[in-house]
Each structure stands twice: as structure tokens, then as C-alpha cells.
Image (spheres, coloured by chain):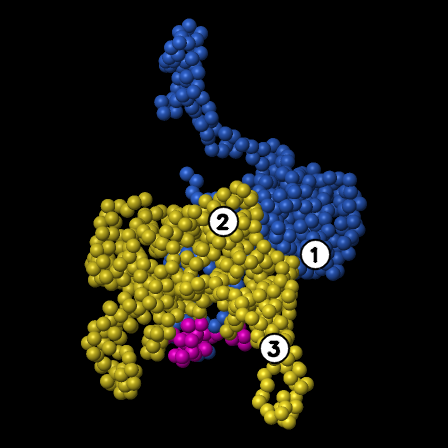
Chain colours: A blue, B yellow
Amino acid sequence: MVRRIEQDHFRFREIVRGKIKSGLKKYISQGELIGRIGKKTVSIPIPQIELPRFRFDQGKKDGVGSGSGEPGDPVDGEPQEGEGTGEAGEGEGQHVLEVDVDLDDLAKILGEELELPNIQPRGAAEVESSHSRYTGIRQVGPESLRHAKRTYKNALKRQMTSGGYDPDDPRIIPIREDRVYRAQKQKQEPQYNAAIIYMMDVSGSMGSEQKEIVRIEAFWIDLWLRHQYKNIETVYLVHDAAAKEVDQHTFFHLRESGGTKISSAYELCQQIIEERFGNDMWNVYPFHFSDGDNWSGKDTTHCVNLLKEKLLPRSNMFCYGQVKSAYGSGQFKRDLDQHFGQDERVITSGIPDRDGILNSIKDFLGKGK
Amino acid sequence: MRLTPELARWQEVIEQHAKEYGLDGYETIFELLSYDELNEVASFGGFPTRYPHWRFGMQYEQLSKGYEFGLSKIYELVINNDPCYAYLMTSNPLVDQKLVMSHVYGHNDFFKNNAWFAPTNRKMMDEMANHATKVRRLVDRIGLEKVEEFIDTALSLENLIDRMSPYRGSTRSVPNKNEPASTDPHRLPSKDYMESFINPPEVMEQERARREQAEEEKQKQSMPRPERDILSYLIENAPLQSWQVEILEIVRSEAYYFSPQGMTKIMNEGWASYWHQKIMTKKVLQDDEVIDYADTMAGVISASGAALNPYQIGLALYHDIEERWNTGRHGLDFDNCSDLKTKAAWNTKANAGREKIFEVRRHHNDITFIDEFLTEDFCHRHKLFTYGWNPQTQQREITTRDFPAVKEGLLRQLTNAGDPVIEVVDANFNNRGELVLRHRFEDSELEAPFAKATLTNVQSIWNRPVLLETVIDDRPVRYRAEEGRIELENID
């Protein structure tokens, strides 16, 4: 039986979904969701879902309480209005409602809003057996699993061919051979593996705002790719004049200084791909974020060569996001565009500020690769 | 689900005790529900059937979360209805079930006998189901989106009712159809030769002009006296379609049904707690249940933070009243006695306490209850204080423990069940059909974002501009809502 509340609950979830969708740009550019992730859900603050009414300003309102303390002492705890219990049942809510949303749902919303195509995985799929279902048929089995309709049909066929069928007295009596039973069938689903390799320029010109932008963008890219692939490995690389692999926390918080040699990152990236994701079963996504300054034109040429010969053949696509900074020249994106302008596997995107994150995500993921 | 035989037996026992104590309620029907079913019913405000609306779904989501995380749990859910429905949760231990049942008999008696509940509909179960049918029919006819949107609007105005109107003879003020007052200025008596000095013609002319203008203003005003039942005012005067009227009527009737519960929170919970305490400790509690009972009871009457707990304050006040009337510690003689020793030993052995609290529960609501029975002594014993926002330290601080201030603060907090008083004062402002609402400002400001959003909702119903007079930072101001825009104007 469908319970009555389910309809209202469903409608509520739908409204929440709509609010998230319409506020997605804000959620993305503010990056506030990142701190709210649980294991499988993210708790999203939804403004203005509570019905407005005339009421007193709760913050400034005077009130009466009980307990110890002298005049002038702070009052602990938030005075609450309306107990959750009681017969009125019309409890007051908080200002901003926090709703838990499945990460998968959030990814779907992102996909719908940005009209992202589903990714067509490449490479051989690793076979993963999923749960078995009663979709098969066999000749023997327990009576509780007898397939009544098919058994009847078999008996009917047999009686008609053997001439034992009388239309005036259509009695069908199944015998042992007619009986068929439902059987479990293992349903096998192909499964693809994916590896995301994030590379970030942490040289002196990348300020905290630039890193924040990278952080936010990486979060949403991660969300989408995790929605598309069941098995995901992430690798984080940072580089200035030299590259090294770090953990996620360090990736977003490290502040180095000094020059920038992008090829160092690409070399390390290539090395990691060969070592860990060498076979065909991996869909590899290298993402590189930088402000576009490179050590020298010679190094850039080296990078282009690395991409052409080593990275691109192994990757689904190569994404380069260029965050605008006060000092960056932005030359690297122009260089890449010049060399790979026609190549669909290389996607470059400029991110002028936080509001640009949304478009940049669309640039990267809009191809469905 | 019906009660288990064991619980049914306990219901009989408890009902018998309640009767012997003089509690007189409607027939009580207990339903045994799983936590999930209980959350569902609680989301609907205790009614198994309500009209479809997402807000119930939101309530459900919050209740389920609260329960699953172990943050909150619904103890009692009882409906003011004849028969009186109440719900028990299957997973509760027996001692809790007994406590809840006893508590419910307290509420039931209060619903039936408290004067402020007298006008409420005792067949609300059926009425709510009717509302649900009506709204579903409207959804089929008008469409879900439109109906839902209008319900949202209507609900945001649901507290704009006149809580006192059910207790007055007529709910509507009769328009004043008096003849226009004479505009002749008042003449001071004078002798002929003094006339031009005592009543100078130019002053008289000015006065006449002023009076004429005032009279004109008065005629223009469409409201002979302010109307607090804004919902009903809109139903009668706003350009609405019949289905919209139907929805507003539903929201309004449910608001009036719930209104006395907001007006008697302290008394009602106090009364129920008083009786579950009595019945449990004197009658039905078994030795091995004492610790669990004490634990639950402590939770029920403990203060959460500094906020006042209506269960605790109400229960303590009934005890205090009973004690005072048992010992005769009330009235002029007692109050005027200045000898502390005599006062402390005061006991007339009047033993009229029980009788008194029954009388109190019949006549009072929270405001008159506090006004009449909150004593200075009680205030100190229960460590009551007022608090306020300190902008310097950015926190709430205790302002005073002074009795008159505490009492005044408490009364103010209870006024209009904690809602600001807002009334229609003019429906034809500037002779342009603009509706003027006035917030009767005491000392608390309205919450601005909510006020604006609500005003926009009123405007969408009224169609012409709607104004709201209120006070911000000690300045009288006026919000003007016009075609979805809100502006703030100063009132000179």
C-alpha cells in the first residue's frame, strides 16, 4: 500500500530538486557544498523553502528563560520555539533547511542542468557479476517456483498435438514433462574503470582564490565522473618546477613558490599511467590546472610532444583548465590551442572567475568522452 | 493497529483512575503505530488524512531524520476530537506507554473542559478528511501547480486571524453608517462685541476647513475599525475566484481549530503532566519501573538550554497553586502579612487546592494563568530571568531577574500566541484601493525578509498595492508591495 505521506514526501523532494537545480550556479560558484559531503550524501542548505509569515525577528527578540547566572551572563543554547512533541504538530523549522541529497542525485541534477551527455567508455570492460534474478527457465525445480503459465501452455500444446483436447470440455492436465520452473539467472553487467589524474600548478603565481576555483571545479568533475563510472581512482599531482604526487588534502592546500615547468607534471603523469593504468581497461582522464605561465617556450614544445606521443593515446581526453590570475600570462592555453585546435581529445577552457566554473565544467564534460 | 491485550487492560485501569480523580474527557481511542507510521501521522499534525501538500512531506523528512539519528522521538500525539484519538509507539517500553496514556487523559480532560477550546470543532477528524477531498477535487479541476501555489500563499497568511473572535458574539464589526458629523467649528460663548476677538472669523474658517477635511478623510476610509481577521477580510473583499475562496476558508478554519492549542500550551502540557505524574506515582507504577519512569520524567520536564519548557513551568505552577490553596497562602491577609516567620508557617488547612486547579483549568488561558498565578516567590524559586540581544557582545544575555520585568516579558511572549499583532486598518488608502496593514508594535521588530515575502503574498491576493506599517530601528516605516516589488517608505 502506498502510504499517504509518500505523495507529499515525493512532492517535497521534487521541490527540493528544483531548488537545487535553479540554484546550481550559486552552489557551484560558492563552493559551499564541498564541506558538506558525507559518505553517500551531501547536505545542501535550501533557502526559502519554509513558508514565510509575519513573525518577530528571532535574533533580536527578548525572551524569558530559566536557569542560573547573573544579569549580563550569556544565555546558553538557542531558545526554541514550539516543542517537537505535543498536539499542535505545526512545529517551526529553521531558517535554512538542510536537505540530504544523494551524491548520485546531485550528479544527475548537474547532468540535466548542464545537459551533459553520458560518457561512452572506451576500452574493454571488466566483467562484474551483479545480483541474480529469476528470469531463467528450467525443467526441474521446487514446486514453489513452478511457472504456471508456461506449464499450462506446454500441457495445452501436448494435449492438442496428441488429440486429447476437447473444446467442449477444455480440461488441461499437466503431466511431469510439461512442468517448467523459474530459474535464477546471473545478470552480468559490464563495468568500466576510470582514473582521474589531477595536476595543478602550485607555483607562486597561483593564489588561494585560484586554488579554490580548482578545488571547486575538481569537486564537480569528480562528482560527475563518479556518477558515470563505478570504479574510480584518483591521483593528485602538484608541480612547480618539479612535479610530485600528493594526497588530496595536500593537493588543495599546498602552497609552493617558484617557477613553473609544466612538462615535469606531464612526465610524471605519463609515468603513473604506464605503471598503474597501463592496460586497456582504464579510462584515463588527466586534468591540468594552471594559470598559463610556463618556464620557457622550449618546455612548452616538450609538453606538446609529450601530449601527442604519450598522453593522448592513453587517455579518453586531456583537459586543460586555465585559471586567470593576476600574474599569469595565459600563454599556455594559446599554445595548446594552436597545436591541438583540431584535436577533439584535447579540451582547453579558460576560467576567469568563480562564475566561470560552470561553463568550464560544461566545456570539459560536454563531449561525453 | 489496535492495542495489544496487555495495553488494552492498562488503558482500562488508567481510565478508571483518571475518572476517580475527576478527569472528564471524551472517549479515548488509542492506536498503536510503528515509528514510521507515527512520523507520518505526526507530519499531518496528528490527523491521518490531510489535503495534499509538500509541507507535510517536509515535516516527515525532518521527523524521520530526527528519529533515525536518535535526536528526537515523539512521545505523545493526541487529537482534540470527539472521540479523542491518541497514538502510542509500538517500540516503547510498557512504562512509557502507561505514562503516555495517563498524559493523554490529562489532555483529553483539558480539551473537553477548558473554556478556550469550547468553540473548536470536535469532529475535526471528519472535517480534515473533507478538506482533503475538497482540495483533491480542486487539484483535478484546476491543476496541481496552481492549487499548490495558492495553498502556499494561503498558508503564509494562516496566522493572520483574530484569535479572540471565537469568544465574542459577532465576529464582524458592523460598519458605522452614521450621518457625517457637522463641520461647524465649536464656538466659545461670547458677548456680541467680543465675538470677533474670542471667535476670530479667520480662525473659525481655518477650523471649519480642518474639520471638513477630517470628515472627508473619514468618509474615504473604508474601515470603521481595524480588522484582525485578515484572512476573512480577504475572503470577503479580495477579487478571488471561488476555488481560491475555498482554499482560504480551509486554511482559516484549520488555523482557528489549532489556535487554542497555541493559547494554552503551558496550561495544557502542565495539566497533562500533572495527571500523568499523579496517576503514575500514586497508582500504576510498579517497583521495577521507578527508575525508568524517573528517567523519562526528568527528560519531559528538563529545560533545554535556557528556553522555558512549558511542561515544566506548567506542572510547577499547578503544584504551586494546589499548595497555596491547600494552605490558604493567597488573598489579602496573606499578601499583607509582613512577618516572614508567620508567612513561612502560614497554613489555614483550607485544603482547597485540588478544587482550585480544576477551576483554573476550566477558565484560564496561558496569559491569564501567568498573570494570575505567577508569584514573585515562584519566579525566584524557578530562577526565571529575561534575556535580550546585546549588540556589543553579539550574544543573548540575561537582562534581569526582577519579578515585574520577568512577568511582563513572559506575558508579552505569550501575547497573540507569540505572533505579531497585525490588522487591516484601511482598504482604500489614498482613495486608490490600497490595503493598509498595521503591525501593532510593542517592542519587537518583524523579521524583514519574511515580512516582505508575506506582504508580497497578501498583495498577490489583494491585487492592488498593499502597505504594511511597522517600526524599524525606532522609526515608523511603511513597506509598500506593488506588483511583486517591495519598497520601504518613511512615515512622516
**Three-letter residue code for mark 2:** His
Taking the image as drawn, is residue A279 in sight?
no
**Three-letter residue code for mark 1:** Asp
- Per the rendering, the mark at residue A353 is 1
Separation of marks 2 and 1 at Cα, in angstroms? 40 Å
Q: Which residues are magenta?
A: B383-412
Disc 2: host chain: B
Q: Earlier in the sequence, mark 3 or mark 2?
A: 2
Q: At 28% from the left edge and 79% from the top edge, which residue is drawn? A: B331
Q: Is residue A109 magenta?
A: no
| Mark 1 crowd level (few <14, some 14–19, many ≥20, 10 Å Cα) | some
Q: Are marks 1 and 3 on the same chain?
A: no
Q: At 65% from the left edge and 39% from the top edge, which residue is drawn? A: A117
- Per the rendering, the mark at residue B183 is 3
Q: Is residue A314 above or below residue A100?
A: above
Image quadrant holding the N terminus of chain B, namely top left
| Mark 3 crowd level (few <14, some 14–19, many ≥20, 10 Å Cα) | some
- Per the rendering, the mark at residue B53 is 2
Do the numbered discs 1 and 3 sit on residues whose CB atoms are within 8 Å?
no
Separation of marks 3 and 2 at Cα, in angstroms? 55 Å
Q: Position of residue B141 (x, y in %)?
A: 54, 42
What element does badge 2 sit on?
loop
